[in-house]
Image (spheres, helix red, strand yellow):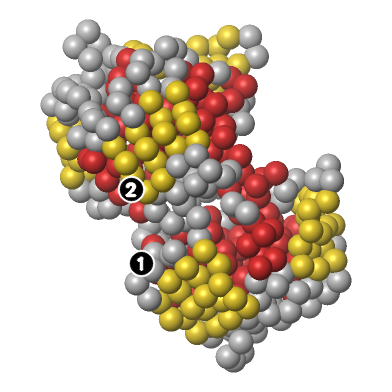
Amino acid sequence: MTKYIVRQSGPLRGEVTISGAKNAVLPLMAATLLNDQECVIRSVPHLRDVQVMKEILESLGSEIEETETGEFHIHTHDVKSAEAPYGLVNKMRASFLVMGPLLGRKGIARIPLPGGCAIGARPIDLHLKGFKALGAEVTIHEEGHYAYVEAVAGPQGLIGDRIYLDFPSVGATENIIMAAVLAEGTTYIENAAEEPEITDLANFLNKMGAKIRGAGTDTIRIEGVKTLKHVTHTVIPDRIETGTFMIAAAITRGAVHIMNAVPDHVKPVIAKLRECGVRIEAGDDDIIVRGDLGPLNSTDIKTLPYPGFPTDMQSPFMAFLTICNGKSTVIETVFENRFMHVSQLNKMGASIETAGNRASIKGNAMLRGSQVMATDLRAGAAMVLAGLVAEGETEISEIYHIERGYENFIEKFAALGADITRVE
Ligand code: UD1
């Protein structure tokens, strides 16, 4: 089994350049299914999740050329299959993002639900509500060990309508936008997600000829078009990777210059780190983080949809709060059950108690190296951050989670002076 060994490393110092955003590139790749012309995506990070999406697109008929400079040339002359393979969908929840574009282009899409009906149906209800509003007939079928969702457009194809999302789901907003691009008439998504990745998707689609207005606000209007054209687009920088390195500078009491960042996309992380006593200077596309200029104090966090504090930064920030002076509270409102990292941090000497979606962190912990698990992608990053300041050696297993979503993770940390090794 592959593991990371993280040793106490002292203050991180130097420069780090942020990669293209995982959560932006996955929907962009899915969106290329709508277009029969070539789409060029630049600044694509080398990640497991990107490879899974690449294999899914290839299984549906896309031709993909990957250059050494991180460019993807994707050309889907024809969608050869409307069904994504179970073996790939099973590996990544974001696979479901191919449903909207498949339905939009082919009028039919079939996507397996990993884990079957009972687990699968609820977290995609808003996606399905959108497809139904556009006139698709949506059914869930059980076949052997798994279930799949089938959506079929009516004889006139999809038809624009008004859709209210009960929660501003990122994936549902993206899937509905993609389904609506080639639909007849105009679609309105109300209470839409406002994340920067949604705006990036709308920009990408508009460059290829779609007519989308209001992305980045809670109401998005998509006027259907008949055809799309060649597009070249550069993925936005990863705001979660940016936040992770900001916390790395803070927790190690270091000084890190973060390049290729969009400070506006990490406003809540900047605000919260400043409340804790971290000095931050934000430029146009860079951020300097100084954790070495004074005491680090506690604060309270509540995760919310964008522009609130991101749920993906919750576990890395909690790792930081364990060493701050005083008591902090973290409230998770976006996902149920996103405190799996708490037991792992406590194993390292943190003092965190949870009740429902609230975690109370005592602070001033003297963390010590121990054997812990990356329980998910961001929790894995939290373990590394804690390991950097823990006495001795921290052994982190299940690190494939980390490699799903952070490009050149070890190399970037090592360049700042972190002592992390990957062992088989
Ligand atoms: C995306 C991000 C993920 C991030 C999350 C929230 C990608 C690939 N992943 O995930 O990193 O943590 O946004 O910022 O972009 N929900 C429903 N029904 C639905 C859809 C969602 O109940 O049909 C619920 C989910 O169970 C969850 C909440 O809504 O509790 C947020 O989910 P959503 O915004 O859809 O997250 P993802 O798009 O899956």
Q: Amino acid at mark 2?
A: Asp
Q: Position of residue 366 (x, y in %)?
A: 78, 78
User: Splitting the image into 4 quarters, where does residue 129 fall?
Assistant: top left
Residue 413, quarter of picture: bottom right
Q: Looking at the image, which residue is at 16% across and 27% down? A: 225
Which amino acid, mark 1? Answer: Asp
Give whichever of 96, 322 is nearer the camera. Answer: 96
**Rendered location of residue 241, percent (x, y):** 53, 59
Q: Depth check: 156 or 228 in front?
A: 228
Q: Nearer the viewer, residue 100 or 356?
A: 100
Q: For residue 31, what is the image quadrant?
A: top left
Seen at 48% across and 31% down, the residue is 65
Q: Give me the residue at 77% from left, 67% from top.
A: 419
* 393 up-or-down from 74: above or below: below
**Total labels drawn:** 2
Q: Is residue 107 left or right of residue 4?
A: left
**10 Å crowding of disc 1: few (<14), some (14-19), many (20+):** some
Q: Is residue 184 left or right of residue 136?
A: left
Alpha-carbon distance for marks 1 and 2? 14 Å
Circle 2 packing at 10 Å, graded few (<14), some (14-19), many (20+), is: many
**Residue 277 at x, y percent in the picture:** 53, 85
- Identify the residue under disc 2: 200
